Amino acid sequence: MSYDLIVIGAGPAGMAAATTASTGGAKVLLLDDQSTPGGQIYRAIETAKDAEAAILGDEYMAGQPIVRAFRAQGIDYVPDAVVWQVSEEREVGYSSGGRAKLISAPWVILATGAIERPFPIPGWTLPGVMMAGAAQTLLKSSGVAAEGAIFAGCGPLLYLVARQYLRAGVNIAAVVDTTPKANRMGALPHLPHALLRWDLLAKGRRWISEIRRSGTPLIQNATALKVIGDKAAQSLVYKTADVDWREIKATHIFLHQGIVPNVNLSMAAGLDHSWDNRQLCWRPLTDAWGCSSVSGIAVAGDGAGIGGGLAAEAGGQIAAIGVLSAVGKLDAQASRDQARRPRAQLAHEHHARPFLDAWFRPASDMRVPNEDTTIICRCEELTLKNIRDTIDIGLAGPNQLKSFCRAGMGPCQGRFCGLTVQELIARETKRPAALVGYYRLRPPIKPLRLEELANLAIDDLEGDDAGQDR
C-alpha cells in the first residue's frame, strides 16, 4: 500500500498533522508506540470521564477534540508500533505485533514529542524514585498515585502534576523547588512580551496558590538534593543558601527539571541540529513549514522545540499543509491561506516561552552533579568519577567517550545521560556545550530482536495492521 505521508507519533502534533493531511486528500499512515492516541500530554484522553477532568484540568481535556477529529478521518493508524529507523531516503523501519517492517513514502513528519531532562542527583536510580512525567503517566493511564510523595526540581510540569495529585485527594509530603533565585533577573527582560499571555502566567500562580492552601510544605531555592536509602528511597535531603541539610521522609520521590525535544530519531535520520542555549538542548533545524535539512522529512511539535500542547497542534497543522503543497494537493496561495490561523496560534503560544525558559532554567549543579559516586549513565551504571576519569584521557567528545566506557550504549541510547555527558565534557574541557556535540546516533534507535530483523517485511503493510487498534 502506498502513502503520501508517514507520521510518527500520535501526540497533538502527530494527530493534527495526520488529520490535516488526510482532510486535504493525502493518503496518511500514522505510527505510534502507545496503544491509544494522545501522546504523553493527552494520554488516555479517549476514556477520560468527568472525574478525570476535575483532577487533570482543562489543559488535559483540550485533547478530546483533537482525538475526535483524528478518529473521524479513518486514517491508517498503527498503535504499539516501535519505530527504530527513519533513513534519509524516508524509509521507515518499525516493529509491530512481533514483526519488523520497512515502508517508505514521499514525505515523513516526525512528531516524536519531548522527554524529561536527565536529573542526576545522588540516589536517583533507587527504587521509589521516578520522574514527575512518569508519575503523571500512572495517574492518567491507571488512576494510580503514590501517597505522601515528594516532588522536587523545577519547571511548570512539577507544579502541574503536584496540583493534579492534590485534586485526586492524595497527600504530598513536600514540593522542593530548585529554581535558582538568580533566574529572576535573567527572565525580567522577557516579561513584557510574556504579559501578552497573562492568562498562562496567572494559571501558574493559581497552581502554586492551590498547593500552598493545601498545607503542603513548599521549599524554594533548594541548592542541592540527595535521595537517601539502602535498597529503596527512604527520604530526600536538601539544602538552601540559608539552611544546611534537612531531611524529608518519603518512599516515593518524583524529580523534574524541564523537558527537551526527543531528538534520537531525528539525529539518527541525519537531520541537521543546532544547540539551543536558551532551552539547553539540541533541536532540529527547520524552516517555516517544519521542513528539515533532509528532503522530504519535516519535524513538528515539541520534537522541534518546546512549546506545549497547543503549539504542537499548530505546528503539526503547518507541517501537513506544507506536505499537501509539496505533493500537489494545494497551490502556494491556498497553502499560505490555510497556514495563517495555525501560524497565529503558534505565535500566541510562544509569547511566554522565552520568559518561562529563563525563569525555569535548571541550575548547572543539578544538570551536572559534583559527587563522584553519582550515577550518570543508568544503563551502564557509570558514575561521575568513571566518566570524568575517561575524559581525563584527553577525549574530544561524547562519541570517543562512548568507545572507551560505553556511556550511551545502553537501551536508552543516551536519552537518560546524553545531555549530562555533553555538559560534563564541556565543564571539564572548558568548551561551550555546542562545540562538544552529542552522541552519533544510528539505527536501530530502539531495541530490535534479531528474529524480527531476519524476517523483515518490506513495503508490506497488511490490512489487519492498519486503520484499527489491535
Image (tube, helix red, strand yellow):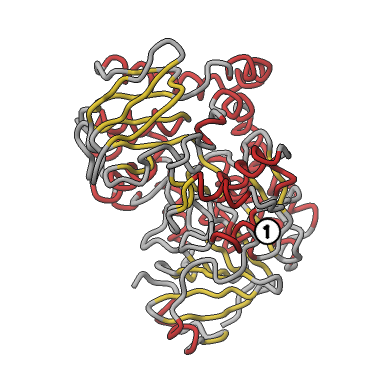
Picture quadrant where residue 368 is located: top right
Where is residue 164? Give x, y as percent. Answer: 31, 32
Picture quadrant where residue 217 is located: top left
Q: Residue at x 40, y 29 (%)?
A: 225
- Callout 1: helix, strand or loop? strand
Q: Residue at x 65, y 61 (%)?
A: 440
Where is residue 291? Give x, y as percent. Answer: 72, 56
Q: Quadrant of the C terminus?
A: bottom left
Q: Quadrant of the N terminus?
A: bottom right
**Amino acid type indicated by mark 1:** Ala
Crowding at dot 1, Cα within 10 Å, few <14 / some 14-19 / many 20+, comes out as many
Asked if residue 119 is positioned above or below residue 348 in the image, the reply reads: below
Residue 365 seen in the current view: yes
Depth check: 83 or 274 in front? 274
Where is residue 93? Give x, y as percent. Answer: 55, 75
List the single residue furthest toward the bottom.
455
Picture quadrant where residue 151 is located: top left
Identify residue for label 1.
298
Residue 50 seen in the current view: no
Q: Residue at x 29, y 24 (%)?
A: 174
Give the total number of marks visible in the rendering.
1
Q: Residue at x 63, y 43 (%)?
A: 342
Asked if residue 417 is positioned above or below residue 219 in the image, the reply reads: below
Asked if residue 322 is positioned above or below residue 205 in the image, the reply reads: below
Depth check: 183 or 271 in front? 183
Asked if residue 280 is positioned above or below residue 44 in the image, the reply reads: above
